[in-house]
Amino acid sequence: MNFSLLENSHSKWRDILVIGKTAERDGRKCHIIGITLSDEAKLYMIEPYMEPESRNRKGPRNHRRMLKEHESHEYSYLHCSDFCLGGEHLKIQGGMGSPMYSDNYGMFQLFFDMMSAGWTIPQWLKDMDWDNLMLLTLNMADVEKLPGFTPQMPITITHSPNPIQHIIEKTVTLNTGKTHSFCFMDHHGDEVFCHINSVALIDVWKNTEEEWKDPKLAERFSPEQLKEAAKHRHDALEQCCPKGMCYIGIEYECSKNYDLTFHSRQYLKSRPEIHQGSSHFLMMHLKPRQETGTHGLPLKGCVIQTPVPPDTTQIPAELFLYHEKADEWTETI
C-alpha cells in the first residue's frame, strides 16, 4: 500500500446529483445511486452479481465445451441507451460493470461523497455482501450541467440490449464452390431455413497485404503507427493462420433475422493452443458482395477461422449458434 494508489483513486467532482431510487424487475433489484460530473458525467447503479458456476468438470476441455460454458453476466442496465429525468433526456454512450471488491478505494470515495450529498442506502441493500453486488458506471454524452431532480420525478430508461445467443449444434457439411440449403428449429419452436449461397477459401495473408496498400491508411495514420499495426497483424496471423493456409468464408441467407455462427467440427473437438510469448487474437468478418441473396433474403457473412489447406473442398462443420436481435424497450421508475 502506498500513496500513489490513493492518488490514482481520488476523484474531484464538479457536481453531484443524488437519485437514490430502486427498480425491481423479475425479482431482481437495481439501485440507482446518482450522477457525478467532472470532465464527463457518469451515472452509477448497483445490481446483484452472481459468480459463474464452477467449471471443474471431468473430460477434455475442448473448444466446444468452452463455448458452451461461456456465459456472460446479464447486466440489467449496462446496455441502456437513454436516461430521462422528468423531461430531461441524457444520452448514454457505453459503460462498464465491475464487482464490488473491498480494495477499490475510488468506489469508497464515491459512496462517501454520495452519502455526504444526501444519499440514503436502502434497507434491502444495507446487509448484502459486496461479493454479491456489481457497480455499473454509465457514461453520459455532452452534459455540461446536471439536471434538477426530486423524488417525485419519474425516471424513464431506454434499454438497447445485446443480441441473444442460442446454441444449436446443427451438423452441416460445407463444400467449396457449392450452394446448400437446410433447416433448423429455433428456440421459439419455429422451422428456420438457411440457404448457403457460397463457400470459399480466404487467403488471409494476401487480403492483409492488399489492405496495407490502401493509400487512405497513410492519410489517417503515421508511418510509425502503420508499422506497429502491421507487426501486430503479422504476429496474429502467424499464431492463428500460418502462411499458405486459408480460412473459410460463408455467405448465407436466413428466413429469420438471425446472425449465424459456423465452426468446423475439427475446431470444436480441438483444445485451445498455448502460444509462447505474447498472445494475439484476430477476429475476421465477411462482408457479402451484395445485399440480397438468391432467395431474395438479406445476404450475410461468416468466417470459420480454422486454418485449412488451399486445396480443401469439403469442411465438416456445425451451425453452432445464432444471435437473435433483442428489441429496444423502455421502463418508468
Image (cartoon, helix red, strand yellow):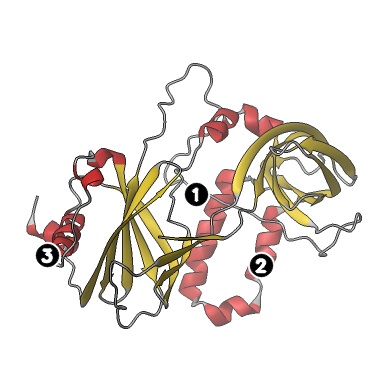
Disc 3: which residue: 116
Work out whether residue 292 or residue 247 is closer to the camera in this orientation and state it: 292
Q: Nearer the viewer, mark 1 or mark 3?
A: 3
Above or below, comparing residue 47 to residue 110 in the picture: above
Sequence-wise first label, 1 or 3: 3
Residue 180 locus on image (x, y percent): 89, 42
SS state under label 1: loop
Q: Amino acid at mark 2?
A: Glu
Which label is found at residue 139? none
The reply to whether residue 300 is visible in this rendering is yes
State the mark number for residue 211: 2
As displayed, is residue 319 above or below residue 278? above
Between the residue at mark 3 and the residue at mark 2, the CA separation in whole angstroms equals 55 Å
Q: Amino acid at mark 3?
A: Ser
Mark 1 to mark 2: distance in Å?
A: 19 Å
Mark 3 residue element: helix
Task: Return the residue nearer the eye: 268 or 208.
Answer: 268
The x and y percentages for residue 144 are 32, 83
